[in-house]
Image (tube, rainbow, N blue to C red):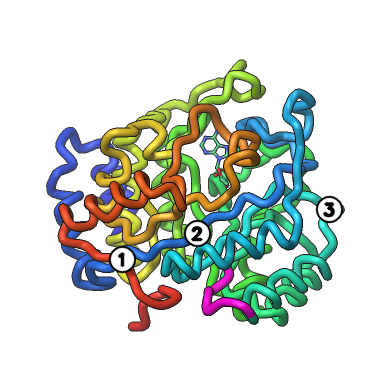
Amino acid sequence: MTREKILAALTEPDASALFAEADRVRHESVGDAVHLRGLVEFSNICTRRCTYCGMRAPNATLPRYRMTREEILACARLAAELKFGTLVLQSGEDPTLEAQWVADLIRAVKNETPLAVTLSLGEHPQAHYALWRAAGADRYLLRFETSDLQLFHRIHPGSPQGKEHPRIAHLHTLRAQGYEIGSGVMTGIPGQSLHALADDLLLFKALDLDMVGIGPYIPDPGTPLAQAAPLAENQAPPTAQTALRAIALTRLLLPRANIPSTTALSTLDPARGRRLGLTCGANILMPNLTPKHYRDRYTIYPGKICIKAPEADDLAALYRLFEDLRRHPGAGPGGRTPA
Ligand code: 5AD
């Protein structure tokens, strides 16, 4: 698909043909299973100052937490009991997080459960990625957020400057170490043009990503980006529509990739977001297993709604949705579908 075709699909008034095609390709390439990944947001400690994120280090009003190994293992057991295939361990970027502690945790999850383990811990030294891979981690998520290097640096103050995109370099390292790699972007970041978004989608393809997470940017009033935000010429709109179109186009570009219907999408459109994602190309959901008393403190953006597992109401609604869509929960770890 050319950049022109992508741009046309992002701006075409009626996206119904695009969504139908993405749904067809999803059905043919990865089938009707929806894989469930149990998400554990185990620490909101973060030293970064990303201008869009409510958990940025300068936010001194946010009480910080790190779950204990036992608390995290309890979540892992729960994920296995609920027949989820994967545990996603996510945290802020915390250089004081001991690499060996994380490795021991991964080993314990792998010993005690049949779960695949996905890490989403931000940028770390190569040696740590290697240690975690050796401990049994299967996948790593690191969104590059935008392929526009200038915009990337504007929203990530303090990131290492250079010709290459810092996170792309990390993704190459992770792939070389044998991880399945996931990346993705926010759609509608102030300063992101539709052209830049088209380039993001082409980069997913060039990187041959195994997983792609795409969600709409949601302004957090306490962050710099929500205060002073110069818009791009041809600004990508911060709507659910833009995110859905990007998801659909990603399915066409990478037919066998794992693509979640994201929490941010459901936050913008609580009534329909989850369903819309699943019918526009997505095949993954990430129910939140973080214990209730920590969940409110993992505030990457305001109003974050999620599938609360193990709350029976939420899971029952989820299974009703599957039935409605003639989909079914995936069995097994749900890695990338082989060619
Ligand atoms: N709106 C939407 N998504 C956000 N993220 C962080 N802050 C926001 C926001 N304000 C996303 C980023 C990050 C992921 C964990 O959450 O893309 O990679």
Tag 3: amino acid: Pro
Which corner quadrant of the image does residue 54 belong to? top right
Q: Which residue is mark 1?
A: 329
Mark 1 within 8 Å of ligand 1, using the beta carbon: no
Q: Position of residue 117 (x, y in %)?
A: 58, 70
Q: Amino acid at mark 1?
A: Pro
Residue 300 lies in what quarter of the image?
A: top right
The residue at the far front in this view is 312
Spatial CA span between label 1 and label 3: 36 Å
Q: Is residue 75 above or below residue 232?
A: below
The residue that disc 2 covers is 38
Disc 3 is placed on an element classified as loop
Q: Which of the marked residues, 1 or 3, is nearer the chain's N terminus?
A: 3
Q: Residue at coordinates 54% horizontally, 45% vertically from top-left?
A: 146
Instruction: Identify the disc placed on residue 95.
Output: 3
Give, as a single range, the part of the protein colored magenta. 112-117
Q: Earlier in the sequence, mark 2 or mark 1?
A: 2
Q: Of residues 131 and 68, which is closer to you in this image?
A: 68
- Marks 2 and 1, Cα distance to the nearest angstrom? 13 Å
Residue 148: image location, x then y, percent:
56, 44
* Label 3 neighbour load within 10 Å: few <14, some 14-19, many 20+: some
Query: Is residue 54 found left or right of 18 in the rendered image?
Result: right
Left or right: 11 as drawn, with respect to 294 = left
Mark 2 or mark 3, whichever is nearer to me: 2
**Could you tell me which secondary element the residue under label 2 belongs to?**
strand
Camera-nearest label, 1 or 3:
1
Asked whether 257 falls inside the magenta stretch, the response is no
Up/down of 108 relative to 282, above or below = below
